[in-house]
Image: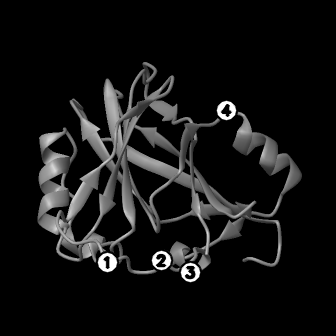
Amino acid sequence: MRKHALRTILLMLPISISCIHVIDAPYPVKEDRKEALLFEQDGLCHLVVRTRISSPELPRSLAWVIPTPRVPVVVKEESAELFPQLYKLIPDRVQVTPTLYQFLPSCSTLPMPGQTIVVHQAQSTEHYTTQIVEIRSENASEALNGWLVKNGFSPVPEQNQRHYLIPGRAFVCVKIRKLPEGTTAQIPPVHLAWQGD
């Protein structure tokens, strides 16, 4: 991915690359569709993700946990118009299997003794509060789930963690505020970027 200043992959994901966590939901919440834009620019790997949810009655708030191969240096909210504009430019959408990470750069193992996780300072945008949980040990599963539960998230099943419990990788934990009233909602895109190889 180093040879080109910009590479873009637009994905419609049949299976989640992240976990939706429902907070205070009176009814089941269904994730109808998830879309992702993956590109490299100026040495950074970028991932922009959005999802559409539906329920007989939407919850007041929602949480999202997104694994990344390195600790993001950018976490921001994108315009809701980003994906509709892209679809006008790129009519053919790429269908993929759950192996999204075949497109991501490998993450070198960093020797970080001590804590199994490091929790970075929370950031807020118009619709989100985000917090990065950095993995520092292959034995971070218990500490990760302990932090998630303590902070209002559902735990991530261990079988879903195994590919991400590598020192230097991270989980971006997103709490979504201001969900509209009704039965469906298009969650505004989350834009993450991390240093490439």
Q: Amino acid at mark 4?
A: Ser
Distance of mark 3 from mark 2, alpha carbons?
12 Å
Q: Residue 111, which numbered label?
A: 1
The residue at 88%/51% (across/down) is: 89
Percent x, y of residue 41 = 75, 60
Q: Amino acid at mark 2?
A: Cys
Q: Secondary structure at mark 1?
A: loop
- Image quarter (top left, top right, bottom left or bottom right) of the N terminus: bottom right
Q: Residues within 10 Å of mark 3 (few under 14, many from 20)?
A: few
Foreground pick, 48 / 70: 70
Distance of mark 2 from mark 4, alpha carbons?
29 Å
Q: Relative to 18, is 29 above or below? A: above
- Image quarter (top left, top right, bottom left or bottom right) of the C terminus: bottom right
The residue at 36%/28% (across/down) is: 58
List the residue tagged with mark 2: 107
Distance of mark 1 from mark 2, alpha carbons?
12 Å
Q: Residues within 10 Å of mark 1 (few under 14, many from 20)?
A: few
Q: Amino acid at mark 1?
A: Pro
Percent x, y of residue 59 = 31, 28
Q: Secondary structure at mark 3?
A: helix
Q: Is residue 148 left or right of residue 81?
A: left
Distance of mark 3 from mark 1, alpha carbons?
24 Å
Q: Relative to 13, is 109 above or below? A: below
Distance of mark 4 from mark 1, alpha carbons?
38 Å
List the residue tagged with mark 3: 102
- Nearest to N terminus: mark 3 or mark 2: 3
Q: Secondary structure at mark 4?
A: loop
Residue 7: name its quadrant. bottom right
Q: Is residue 146 left or right of residue 82?
A: left
- Nearest to N terminus: mark 2 or mark 4: 4
List the residue tagged with mark 4: 79
